[in-house]
Image (cartoon, rainbow, N blue to C red):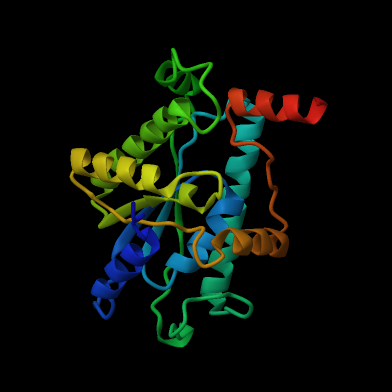
Amino acid sequence: MNRINHDREMRQEIEKRRGEEKLPRLLLHACCAPCSSACLERLLPYFAITVFYYNPNIDEEEEYRKRAAEEQRLIGELNRLVRARDFDGMHFDDGVRPEECAFREIAFIEGDYRPGDFLQTVRGLEKEPEGGARCTACFRLRLRETAAVAAKLQVDYFTTTLTISPLKDADRLNAIGRQAGAEAGVCFLASDFKKREGFKRSIELSERFGLYRQDYCGCGFSRRERESADNQ
């Protein structure tokens, strides 16, 4: 079976909007700053971006707050570069000339932190393996909320940083995103940010900006799985 090239889909959609007088508006669901870094770098020339940090799956509030603060710090660093028009060391797509781009500063919205919503969503799926049905339910929760906020803001598109992870299935995420967009009446921008060495680039940018890189997705199930692996 031929897999859909979601990265090509994204580039084709971007190309359709190139040259418009007004930048299309994008709501980007963000799981963490390291994953956001390469996604934002790739999207900055083409969209007026608002980052939506919504992750009720994170079970420890201290961890949640730490990741939220890092997300805001990264956005601040990138906005400083935008204001200064200082893009030295930034990697944009071939053919993108920064001096010709109408870069906009990135906005930030933090969703409600209600871990009980996540636990209710995955009830009955507690024993599912990491990456299975429990994760699908988690993705659906987060992307439906993102779609609802996107509709409220009346943006042109929404998408998620989650596809940058080599451990996450882009087909599944894009299918969930499209469904959420159809339900909310807003366009989902297909993506597979791990393509074109996106994950590698996220590591490089994390080092450049000194970002905190967590070693588990955020939920208690993944944390316990990681701790179990460490103790073996």
Where does the image place residue 217, in percent across and percent down from the top left? 59, 36
Which residue reaches farthest right? 231
Q: Tell me where residue 169 appears, x and y as whole percent.
A: 45, 45
Q: Position of residue 156 (x, y in %)?
A: 25, 57
Of residue 1 and residue 46, the one placed in the foreground of this image is: 1
Quick one: 137 or 232, which is closer to the camera? 232
**How many callouts does the rendering have?**
0
Which residue is most to the front? 1
Question: Residue 4: which quarter of the image?
Answer: bottom left
Q: Residue at x 41, y 32 (%)?
A: 136
Query: Which of 15/67 is in front?
Result: 15
Q: Please say if 122 is above or below 45.
A: above
User: Can residue 169 be seen?
Assistant: yes
Q: At 79% across and 30% down in the image, what residue appears? A: 230
Q: Is residue 215 above or below residue 157?
A: above
Q: Quadrant of residue 226?
A: top right
The residue located at (37%, 64%) in the rendering is 48
Q: Is residue 72 visible?
A: no
Q: If the image is split into quadrants, where does the C terminus sit?
A: top right
Q: Residue at x 74, y 29 (%)?
A: 229
* Drawn side of residue 191 relative to residue 196, left or right: left
Of 18 and 153, which appears nearest the observer?
18
| Image spot of residue 202 (x, y percent) | 61, 59
Considering every residue shown, the one lying at the far top of the view is 124
